[in-house]
Amino acid sequence: MLITIKDIEDAHARIREYLHETPVLTSSSFEKEFTPGKRVHFKCENFQKTGSFKARGALNSVIKLHAEQPNLSSKGVLTRSSGNFGAGLAYAASLVGLDCHVACPVSCSPFKMGSIEKYGGKIHLYPKGWESRNSIIPRLEAELGAYTIFASVEPASVSGHGTVALEILNQVPDVDAVIVPSGSGGLLAGISTAMKNKNNKIKVYGVEHDTSLNLKNSFQLGEAIQPTERRDTICDGISNTSVTPFALEHILEYVDDIIQVPDTGAISALVFLLESMKIMTEPTAALAAAALMQPEIVKKYFSECQNIVVVLTGGNFDILKKLHLLGETQTKISA
Ligand SMILES: Cc1ncc(COP(=O)(O)O)c(C=O)c1O
């Protein structure tokens, strides 16, 4: 069953006091260079509590569960995450006094794992490969008795993610298109459900990296594909995921298309956002801006649009280490 606009509005009422209403920023240099004649609005979820939109779904799930079924959550909550949902869940669990366990792949960014631990989450590492990815949760459930919440499976989580759209509609009332970086599809499902139920003329697009075998293929096939191989990408937020059947149901109902951009585009967008707008995003989050930096994409999808919203989904990236700036600075200081 699909989530409804009422689920999303209820979620907003439930979680808003624990979150930021993130700002929407614009850049005339971005518009001049990439989208002349159009207004581009950057919805800055990188400034959200825990550094990503995932806190929204995590909070809605945990607060609702804790209030409605306290027995289920008495041994704590559990998830599998490449970092951001884990941090969101740890934050949410800490607010209501629950334990939080997060299964992370060994390849998980140390920066993101640090964030999970900062909010009191306990990390359980699992080795590379599909088998260990799929078996870790049943094993931990049996061991810990904790209640599992998957970001893009739990309806309350998808409804929580959808609250981004309610804020956008308030902040940019004449929005006519939204672009959303997507992996397991929960954010795209939530945003598209809210947007289309409020105004079905608003276009909603998902975006993923162009070596992904995940979302575009599933969207075209009409069925959630479980990729059997992984392609390397700098977009760690979506590198280890596949769209869930629950999210895909919403995406097939409400989303206009899935756009793909290369990793190099995500890096260029990340650098633009940092240098020109002083906005720090992670590579996955920069994908929507990257889409608008490609003239053929602007022409194909946005020629009729005036007000385009780009969702900057998160900012959890150890950029100083990645750019080796720290090493250089330390060398200079000690010289
Ligand atoms: C920063 C960031 N953006 C986008 C996504 C994609 O969200 P979803 O998995 O709901 O499609 C993720 C997922 O972890 C993420 O961490």
Image (cartoon, helix red, strand yellow):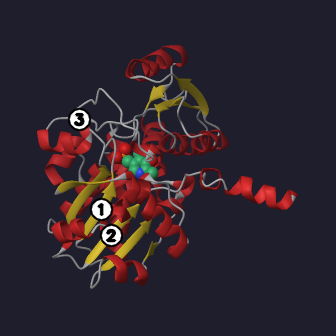
Kindly report the distance in space between the C-alpha atoms of the residues bearing marks 3 and 1: 21 Å
Residue at 24 percent across and 62 percent down: it is 195
Residue sticking out furthest to the right: 334
Q: Quadrant of residue 254?
A: bottom left
Q: Secondary structure at mark 1?
A: strand
Q: Earlier in the sequence, mark 3 or mark 1?
A: 1
**Residue linked to disc 3:** 245
User: Does residue 4 lie above or below 273 as drawn?
Assistant: above
Q: Secondary structure at mark 2?
A: strand
Residue at 28 percent across and 65 percent down: it is 178
Mark 3 residue type: Pro
**Residue linked to disc 1:** 179
Kindly report the distance in space between the C-alpha atoms of the residues bearing marks 3 and 2: 26 Å
User: Does residue 103 lie above or below 275 as drawn?
Assistant: above
Kindly report the distance in space between the C-alpha atoms of the residues bearing marks 2 and 1: 6 Å
Estimate how packed mark 1 is, as few (under 14), some (14 to 19) or many (20 or more) residues with alpha carbons within 10 Å: many
**Residue linked to disc 2:** 309
Mark 2 residue type: Val
Placement of the N terminus among the 4 image quadrants: top left
User: Does residue 328 lie above or below 71 as drawn?
Assistant: below
Instruction: Pick the residue in front: 303 or 199.
Output: 303
Say whether marks 2 and 1 touch (CB < 8 Å).
yes
Q: Secondary structure at mark 3?
A: helix
